[in-house]
Amino acid sequence: MKFSSKIFNSHPKTDGNFFSGIKKILGFKPKDIDIYKKAFLHRSVNKRDAEGNPMNYERLEFLGDAMLGTIISKHLYNEVPEGDEGYLTKMRSKIVSRKHLNELGKDLELLRFVESRIPKSHFGENIHGNVFEALVGAIYLDRGYQYCEKFINAKVIDPYVDIEQLEGKVISYKSLVIEWCQKQKKTFRYDVYEDTGNDELKHFGVKLSIGDKITAKARATSKKKAEEKASKRAYFALQSKIENPQH
């Protein structure tokens, strides 16, 4: 098994390799390298500190998750002054999704530093994101908030966070639904009608039929908005089929 299990060895050369590897990832010099060693220690090693407390990356992962959420929240708060609480929460969730964190951990090749008694092939996908969060926690304990923010800006926000893309502004659900129907050779029809109801503003109702079945209904203050709203509902109702057309 090729593991970096020797990182806890006191051999100066091994420690030096770990130190230089972490320094390269961080972009700055660690003060207390032992904190970072703990960030890559899997619970299967079953190590304990002098007081008998378990030593592994899970507590640092908890801390890193909180720091990541705080720094991303601050960025969104500053960048999108018009965003309400619901919007900001949604955007933060997209940035710190488990899938995204796993990708970050893979990009930085963090698994190479992990000390474990379990073969790498037995790890679940989430270990990449878990270790990334543990690394963030280690940075906070070692160098404080400012360096933590610097790292997250460099590794997460600058390369990956595009507000417009996260908002999905470029997406027209109507065009996605129509494109899918055409590819699948399915007929579709938008039936639009005035729907005044009890509203002061005139509303329009839409029934979107795919094949011979009404797939979604919606109402809005314009025909265009009503069609887009119905298309969005249809898209999420059919999402697995649209995104995986082979199934």
Image: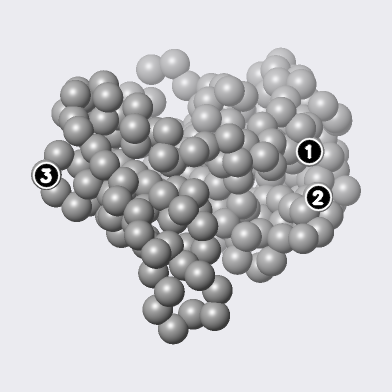
Q: Secondary structure at mark 1?
A: helix
Q: Which residue is mark 1?
A: 153
Asked if residue 80 is positioned above or below residue 51 in the image, the reply reads above
| Residue 76 position in % (x across, y down) | 74, 53
Identity, as a three-letter code, of the amino acid under mark 2: Glu
Identity, as a three-letter code, of the amino acid under mark 1: Asn
First-in-chain label (2 vs 1) = 2
Q: Is residue 2 left or right of residue 146?
A: left
Taking depth in this image into account, of 81 and 104 the one nearest to the observer is: 81
**What is the distance, in whole Å, between disc 2 and disc 3 at their CAs?**
46 Å
Residue sitting at x 18%, y 30%: 186
Q: Farthest residue to the left: give it.
A: 212
CB within 8 Å, label 2 to label 1 = no
| Label ID, residue 212 | 3
| Residue 59 position in % (x across, y down) | 57, 56
| Residue 171 position in % (x across, y down) | 52, 37
Taking depth in this image into account, of 126 and 100 the one nearest to the observer is: 100
Q: Is residue 135 left or right of residue 81?
A: left
Q: Which residue is mark 2?
A: 79
First-in-chain label (3 vs 1) = 1
**What is the distance, in whole Å, between disc 3 and disc 1 at their CAs?**
50 Å
Quarter of the view holding residue 219: bottom left
